[in-house]
Amino acid sequence: ARGASARGSPRTRPRAPRRGTTTTTTRSTTTTRLTTTTTTTTTRAPETRAYPVAPLSCFLEHGDDDEGADEGADVWTTHAVPRADVVKALASADVVTRDDRKCNCFTKSYGKYVKGTGSFISDVRVVKGEWDGRIRNGQGADVSADDGSGGVRLRYFTEREVANVHSFPPEFTFPSHVTRAQRYALLGNSLSVACVAPLIDYLLNDV
């Protein structure tokens, strides 16, 4: 009994091969072949939609051309860019005209700081790097003393014009007690619905 317990049960203990015999183990291997079929689908490029961009003249509330500009003549004085600001921002100022179709983003500091806060509007197209900064805004407290030839009329966009660029409805108005600086601050960094809507339409329908 002791020998059986130490050596294991005769039924579970493997039998030793007899002398003169050879044990051979054979494994059966099954090979599976996978066939991959590649289907090429030709996708036609979507049609390109044209989203027309209106010139800035469509967003201006005053006539800024030389003909019939009496209605908005005073805006060149009330919203004139001071000479000190012109000199300070000459290298980085973005000057646009009524015929341009884009301008810089208006931030909440527009009208307070001149660098990177928004575009100025001029009656004459200027070439950056060639313009010497001379302006001729007429007569007023915040007007440059430079009235020499080659000067341009230069002003800030009005609060209503910034609202127009940002697609605010025509009936939108500010309370009378809100100052110009506060209006610029409230309008700053807004998103133009007329600009964002075509982008969303393109992302959802054209791709």
Image (tube, rainbow, N blue to C red):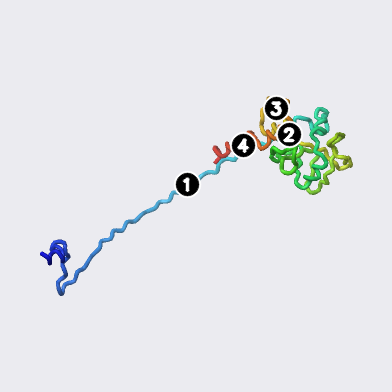
Q: Earlier in the sequence, mark 4 or mark 2?
A: 2
Residue 181's disc is 2
- Say what amino acid the circle numbered 3 marks: Phe
Q: Nearer the viewer, residue 51 or 89?
A: 89
Q: Residues within 10 Å of mark 2 (few under 14, many from 20)?
A: some
Give 106 or 26, whichever is nearer the viewer: 106
Q: CA distance from mark 1 to mark 4?
A: 33 Å
Q: Is residue 153 left or right of residue 172?
A: right
Indicate the amino acid at tag 4.
Answer: Val
- Residue at 46% of width from left, 49% of height from top? 40
Q: Are marks 4 and 2 in contact (CB under 8 Å)?
A: no
Mark 2–mark 1 distance (CA, rounded to whole Å): 58 Å
Farthest residue in the bottom direction?
Answer: 20
Vertically, is 15 above or below 65? below
**Disc 4 from disc 2: Cα separation:** 26 Å
N-term-proximal mark, 3 vs 4: 3
Please say if the residues under marks 1 and 4 sit with CB atoms less than 8 Å apart.
Answer: no
Q: Crowdedness of circle 4 by 10 Å Cα count: few (<14), some, many (20+)?
A: few
Query: Quick one: label 2 or label 1, which is nearer the N terminus?
Result: 1
Q: Which residue is mark 1?
A: 41
* Label 3 neighbour load within 10 Å: few <14, some 14-19, many 20+: few
Q: CA distance from mark 2 to mark 3?
A: 12 Å
Q: Residue at position x 37%, y 54% from top?
A: 35
- Res. 181 image quadrant: top right
Instruction: Give the foreground label among 2 and 3.
Output: 2
Q: Earlier in the sequence, mark 2 or mark 3?
A: 3
Of the 4 image quadrants, the one containing the N terminus is bottom left
Q: Which residue is mark 4?
A: 196
Callout in the foreground (2, 1): 2
